[in-house]
Image (tube, rainbow, N blue to C red):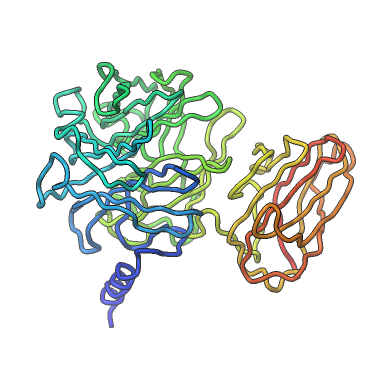
Amino acid sequence: MNHATIFKILIFISLFCCSSVFAQNPIVPNVGLNDPHIHIFNDTAYIYASHDKSANNKKFIMEDWWIWSSPDLINWKKESILKPEDTYINDKNFTRCWATDVAYRNGKYYWYFSEGNQQTGVVVGDSPVGPWKDVLKKPLLTSELTPTDEYDMAIFEENGEHYIIFGVWDYYIAKLNYDMISLAEKPRKLIINNPRGPYNSDGKNLEKPTDDKPFVHKYNGKYYLSWGCFYAMADNLYGPYDYKDSVIKQESFAKGYDAPTWPNGFLQGRHGSFFEWNNQWYYTYCDISQTGNRYFRDTFISYVHYKENGEMATIRVDGVGVANYNANYKIEAEDYFKAEGISKIEIENGFAIQTNAHKSYVNFTNIKALDKKSRLILNVKAKNGGKFLINVVKDALDGEVIANKTFELTTNLEKSIEIILNLETLQNKENIYILIEQLTNNQLQIDSFSFSK
């Protein structure tokens, strides 16, 4: 049996059983889930995405839009499908169901979709997964609206107001009316100083300075306009934006995830979005390293960590993904799934977490290979010294205590020291909470932790 036949069999098996799957990266393998926008509604992650039809695609064939949901970024379930014949497009043979995004306002959900690279429509539903109705019965953004193409939109919400951002090469923004299906103003061009992109590595390509698929998010008072893995920053939503960097670099890739890539290299085609959940930031994006086909893309998720200057650190691109841990390896503390009373801080060799409340916790889900581990080793320090109590529990904040320790640290430790906690018997996979109490009101810093026998 040749490799091509084996690959097709694997694709068939994946498609057959993919209504509910367990995966890391890709989050739902080999189904063509791409152009991901993830939003959190009712403490559940929903991905609004495009759908490449087949592993045999020789061009973009995208016949519908998808919604999948997850309670933990690991287990994903297909929830809803929007077909072009159920919108103003009204064409069962339409194959250009491009990127999409969603917004919530006043009990309604508004799902915006690209009519290829030409126009943008919108459907309305009473839940994050519909059912959906095209109440406008025509495009919201028409092809003659601006000098760019009116597709690949993103929705940004701030203080109850919503804005739509769209375009290719040049991006435009407009505030939406309260009805969410009409514009409150004429679209304005977003100025980007010194832009770069997959076609413009040196800044000289004025015809294609950026890319398609713009997205906007806000962190710590700054606005981030991204196009794929490239981004710029501004103090004002309407700009001007200053180009900063790409979150993906050559050193991002784990073995087996750096090839194949698009014709213009690994920075091309990284359509996606940034989102926050449980005090953790993520980037979700397209990848073709596992399918080998630019017309049959997967979706990945990686952690995002912000430097002191506001710029985003280089992400990791690997098969581990997020909310997924292996007790046989060191676990970085900043890669938690959930936290309260905790801040991420930049340190010399990367990032760490630091308490900012009298009581705080961090949660790490799906830690595997724990059944033969008997010790938890924390790498900690405290700038001003102090006394601390740590309780380790499983399953929930008020769950069974499996380890605890009170300890003191001296002032001005130059390096982290190891704090060792003896663990109760564990199952192979556990959901672990580390609860920290500042007994002397001093902040504790945790760089990483590991398990041993």
- In the image, is residue 433 above or below residue 238? below
Q: Quadrant of the C terminus?
A: bottom right
- The x, y position of residue 181, in whole percent, is 25, 28
- In the image, is residue 387 above or below residue 431? above
- The x, y position of residue 81, in whole percent, is 26, 52
Q: Is residue 36 left or right of residue 245?
A: left
- In the image, is residue 247 above or below residue 216? below
Res 429 quadrant in image: bottom right
Farthest residue toward the bottom?
1
Which one is nearer the viewer's eye here, 13 or 203? 13
Q: Residue at x 58, y 50 (%)?
A: 337
Q: How many numbered circles are shown?
A: 0
Q: Quadrant of the N terminus?
A: bottom left
Res 181 visible: yes
Res 260 visible: no
Res 216 quadrant in image: top left
Which one is nearer the viewer's eye here, 399 or 156? 399
- The x, y position of residue 191, in whole percent, is 35, 20
Q: Residue at x 63, y 60 (%)?
A: 431
- The x, y position of residue 56, in whole percent, is 21, 64
Which one is nearer the viewer's eye here, 280 or 411? 280
Q: Is residue 193 left or right of residue 305?
A: left
Q: Residue at x 48, y 29 (%)?
A: 218
